[in-house]
Image (tube, helix red, strand yellow):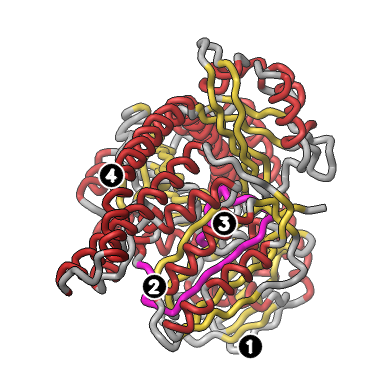
Amino acid sequence: MTPSESLPTLLEHLATMARADFACVYRYLADFDELIAVAAFPNQPCAAAEIATRQAIEAGQSPYWVSLAPSAQPPPLRSGKVILLRIEQEIIGALGLFSTQPSYQSPDTAEPWILWAQSIVENEYWRENQSIAATIVNMARLFGNTPSPQELVNILGTELAGPHIWYCALLLYGPMREDRPYGPFPYLEIQGTWSRQFGSGIALGLRIYLDQYPDLLAELQHRKVWYIMDVRSIEARLDPLIRGFLKLSQIHSILLLQLEVGDRPIGLLAIGAEKQHDINASEIRHYTAVSEFLAMTALQRLLQQQHDFVQRARATLLDAVSDGVLMILPDSTQMSGGEGSHAQVLTVNTCFSATFNVTPARAQGLSLKQLLHRMQLPEDVRKDLARRWFSIPVRDPSRQRGEFTMMHPKGHPANIEWTSAPVYQDKRVMGRIYTFHDASAERSATHLRSDFISRLSHELRTPLTSIKGFAQLLLEQAEAALSPDLRNYSRIIFDNAEHLNQLFSTVIEITRADTGDIKLSLMPTRLSDVVQQVANFYLTRCQAHQVRIELNLPTTLPAVRIDSNRVAQAIAQLIDNALKHTPPESIIYVAARFIGDAAELPPGAPVDALVPSILVSVKDEGVGLLPEEVENVFLPFYRTREARINKREGAGLGLTLARSFIQLHQGNIWAESRRKGGGIFFFTLPAVIE
């Protein structure tokens, strides 16, 4: 016999023994703060009794004595007490005894009957818990591994729902996004349905857009479990399609359960009952437990789908990349992050396999040392890569790059440029990615272009030398015989010939640097000394322009291995550029500092900037660069808008030459857009750490 069948008789005897005019029993679902009437005598529970019961639960006091205001609703209760029913510290229900008299007193003879009522409610609670546990075990057995939403609903409807349940539906929030896992979501999509009348799969894919139901959604999110005993009470708040479906399915009451894991919303489970039956408290507890299991199962499937999608997308993306790609992770046995040689290969792409003749299946799971041994490489290249790759831990945030020459499996010499960079997850280095770019075609095209430009420049310099020489001869030997206009014309010819000669020299230097034809004389050098020498050279010009250079060069900076003359030329171009754009009575700031970690670089630094390094900045007090000018300013012959408007002198090659010389030293150079106080240029050079 269920509580709803046995308790009315018990309450009748209890009311007599306790001298009460009204007795009732409620179940309390603490998770949802829901009171559910189980039984009452002599009639259905009244509003006054429910209010008093909720007050007792909120106070947590038992017995809880109450005084009630007279009401027109029979019986006209005036006083009473509420006894909370507990298992350990959890409130599972309440027993109410009420009187129409102003002051109610319960005799001791009623105590056994109170204990009997409490025992019935407790037994029902334990029976439900056992039934719920059995339901979950049965569901786990039936569902198997990551079932689809439709499979979940089919099992729920055919195996677990009672005969009075006519409809079940599983709706999931969409779209699920990694960057917004907690919403807000624009819609709920029906992904599984079961109907005793129409079968399964009706209205799959239908989207219910939530902007139409803000009040219903807010109420559901507040309640978590919302039992609507008569759907007609909310019909006016539904659109015509849903209203029509509820009528067609003959659904009288509906249970809505919010599906969530922790604080993450997943979707909604809807269970509808036919007209002759309601969903009782025991069923609500069952379906609540089922909904929690469904939420975890649905989330597991969503995460698996996202993982599979990411894996497929990663494989497709890697194979679509025209460069070779190698991804490594630290060896799990290396507690400190692992030496490079012990790193484990996660994946390689098709281009890597084609270049080094190592298939993905053979590469995956190898250590980086084993993979390097299997790659088809000249032995001297292999030793050099081993020295550089194994010198830092896998989780080191620094970047590396280099190049080597090898014979490609297709039979042609290949110039391979490689880059190694950290891969981050939640600001933590989780591994490294290596890219291998075959620069043979670009190198060949660059050599052809540079050879053409070099030859053209040399050919143009021959007649230019004659023009300059004759102009100089006129100015030196025939100046007295020339009229003022002719002397002026001769000076213009000479100055422009000199300008063109410098221009051709600069173009030749840039092309030689870009093709690697310049041989550097690398020596350990204090970069601060080089900057100081260049600043001293510009001292006179700065004084003429009423501009001051302010230096900030720490004496403790590590050395750099550079060709001092080439780096001095690059620094000179940056100071010269600042001088052109700095107004009189202003300052050019030149500073240098040590960068030991990539996090210490300025926000706009290139992602492939090497560390440890020395960072040099040259800042002026001019108008600065526009955002669209930052990348273009290093292109040959590019002139900024401000330079064009003010007709500043220069061909637009100085910064190009500076970039070429810095890059020859494995450094990086970049600019930042307009900021308060003028423009700023940066460059880095790898530091020599003893």
- Nearer the observer, disc 4 or disc 2? 4
Above or below for 543 versus 244: below
Q: Residue tagged by mark 1? A: 103
Q: Residue tagged by mark 2? A: 580
Q: Which SS class for mark 1?
A: loop
- Nearer the observer, disc 4 or disc 3? 4
Q: Mark 2 and mark 1: span between their CA atoms?
A: 98 Å
N-term mark: 2 or 1 = 1
Q: Give the residue drawn at x 74%, y 69%.
A: 110
Q: Give the residue drawn at x 77%, y 34%.
A: 387
Is the Cβ of the residue at disc 4 closer than 8 Å to that at disc 2? no
Q: Which amino acid does label 2 sit on?
A: Lys
N-term mark: 3 or 1 = 1
Q: Which SS class for mark 3?
A: loop
Q: Residue tagged by mark 3? A: 263
Q: Which SS class for mark 2?
A: helix
Above or below for 358 versus 151: above
Per the rendered image, the range of residues in magenta is: 603-625
Q: Mark 4 and mark 2: span between their CA atoms?
A: 31 Å
* Spot occupied by residue 401 in the image (x, y as percentages of width and height): 62, 40
- Nearer the observer, disc 3 or disc 1? 3
Mark 1 neighbour class, 10 Å CA radius: few under 14, some 14 to 19, many 20 or more: some
Q: Residue tagged by mark 4? A: 463
